[in-house]
Image: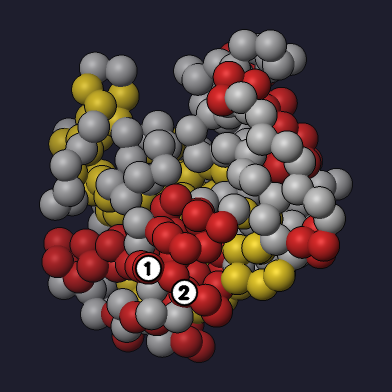
Amino acid sequence: MARVPWILHAFSTRACGDLRSPDTPRPAGTASVRPSVLRKNRQRFLLQLGARKFDLVAVRQIHSSTVVQVIRNGTRLEYRPAGYPIAGGVSGVYADALVTDEPEVLLSVSAADCLPVLIADLRGLVVAAVHSGWRGALKRTAEKTVGDMRRIFGSKPRDLIAVLGPSIRSCCYEVGQEVADAFCGEFVRGEEFFCKSRASAEPTAPAQPGFLSRMPPGHDRLPRLGFCLDLVRAVRDQLESAGVPDRRIHVMDFCTSCRNDMFFSYRREGAAAGRAMAVIGIRS
Ligand SMILES: [Zn+2]
């Protein structure tokens, strides 16, 4: 993708600072970064990218399969649901994938362990950004995004290129039996997305009452039952089923948990973890 001159894209690292939205404060009880600092972090990141002319698009991510098309209407940006019911309203747009063919619109997704996926149609001048944790992978968000690129813009899957960014990898992504079961029920090759975890031999911790183990949606501490999810494999499987050629799917070889020195990791740092950002846009 770096060799395609009309695409501007990047994955941030820890050195770029916490790039979460200044409008979504940290959960109560965690050290908070001032909104002014978050705003500055984002400005600096865009400046370093040479994206000063771009309009940054960041939606509220809810581990859904909602895809939103971003359209420029005069000086305003409009968000159109891409064929799926959309939640949200006055307080913002809720979605986990964005598509656009508008130049100088910088689509972004943020993550701290979840997998950011950037997609571009090399012939059609269309770009997409997808946020996929295990819930998004189970809901086939990446596959649906390719479907929407076909439907809205007439993109041909063989012309698509995809980059799977840094995320928690199977070495560190332990999940419960129910997650493994859900994937095996949804995907023909679901079993291939899992491996036995190193901790599977350890005795499992006694179950805690719900109020002690409550986590933000999508980040539940799952019971240790000895399965590790290969998120990259699950998302790659979807892109391949959607028709994206295998040679056009690129994977950045970083586990956010193993390389906590370079990336934010929710599993490693908990609710205090910052957020990385993946961005893609079309240069004018
Ligand atoms: Zn790891």
Identify the residue at image location x=48%, y=44%.
109
Which numbered mark, 1 or 2, is in the foreground of this view? 1
Q: Which amino acid, mark 1?
A: Gly
Q: Quadrant of the C terminus?
A: bottom left
Answer above or below: position of 177 versus 12.
below
| Mark 1 lies on residue | 185
- From this viewpoint, is residue 155 visible? yes
Residue 106 vertical position relative to residue 44 in the rendered view, above or below? below
Q: Position of residue 115 (x, y in %)?
A: 55, 55
Q: Earlier in the sequence, mark 1 or mark 2?
A: 1
**Which of 101/75 is in front?**
101
Question: Cβ–Cβ below 8 Å for labels 1 and 2?
Answer: yes
What residue is drawn where x is 60% and y is 71%?
194
Residue 159 quadrant = bottom left
Scheme of colours in the image = secondary structure
- CA gap between label 1 and label 2 equals 7 Å
Could you tell me which residue is drawn at 49 percent across and 70 percent down? Answer: 234
**Residue marked by disc 2:** 190
- Classify residue 93 as left or right of residue 229: left
